[in-house]
Image: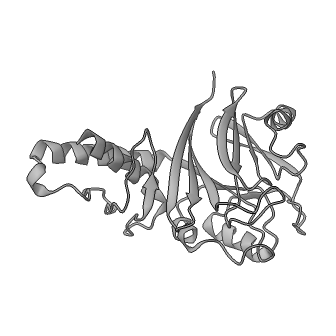
Amino acid sequence: LAEELLCFVWEQLCAVLVSDRGPWTHVRFQRSGLRSTDRRADAGGESLAGTTGSCCCASNVAKREEEAGGVRQKEQNMVLVLCIGDLHIPHRASDLPAKFKGLLLPGKIQHILCTGDLCVKEMHDFLKGICSDLHTVKGEFDEAAYPETKTLTIGNFKIGLCHGHQVVPWGDLDSLAMLQRKLDVDVLVTGHTHKTKAYQYEERLLVNPGSATGAYSSLTEDVKPGFILMDIDGSRIVSYIYSLSADGEVGVEKLEYTKNA
């Protein structure tokens, strides 16, 4: 039961991206070795697929309702930041995956950080429709007059944004750390490599949302579509790392980072 509850709470945290009544299905959640597939929870979070009435006593139901109430309070306090980029539409991809479009709905996200290479105005307008607070930097193939780098503050974090082709060698941790120090930021968001990653390095956070369309890069043609959603709460960031497998299954991994005082 404890394992089921943990999966339930995890699903409810992720379900903030979904429409108020829509089910969250066909998603693989990875946390401490736990996996949950094809679970459904309604908007209030009172139901838990796979748990039958015969094995639920009143106390267990009350516990789940209490957990769901805590999750709803958590959702109200969330500052959700979408990190996305390297779409390369229409040159290397025709559109975002339908599974991703179904998750990225208006009214759920407070900020968008885009690493560039949108390539067409239509994708800029699409992201703007998800969230009006859109911050974009210039990629190699962008014709729009985006800045090369940008810094902003969200919560207790100063965040830097850069496409990443300027950082040589591409994706090198030491080189990224040098840019992070130069911009004097706690979190650095870059792209270009089309590899979806988030990791702590030198007590700071490095984020690469990869390519949301799975477009090939100069480094590899084997690219999984991906993006990263950051939940910022005070001095703590929880990064949800989304990827789309070849069989169309959306996977989510989690990384927690706390800023030193």
Height in image: 177 above or below 44? above
Height in image: 20 above or below 82? below
- Residue 30 x/y as whole percent: 46, 47
Q: Is residue 233 visible?
A: no
Task: Give the quadrant of the N terminus.
Answer: top left
Task: Give the quadrant of the C terminus.
Answer: top right
**Outermost residue, top side:** 261
Is 235 situated left or right of 36 in this image?
Answer: right
Height in image: 179 above or below 210? above
Q: Which residue sits at x=84%, y=49%?
A: 164
Q: How is the image coloured?
A: one colour
Q: Is residue 121 visible?
A: yes
Q: Quadrant of residue 220?
A: bottom right
> Who is closer to the viewer here, 56 or 71?
56
Q: Which residue sits at x=82%, y=39%?
A: 172
Is 82 situated left or right of 185 in this image?
Answer: left
- Residue 176 x/y as whole percent: 82, 38
- Residue 138 x/y as whole percent: 86, 59
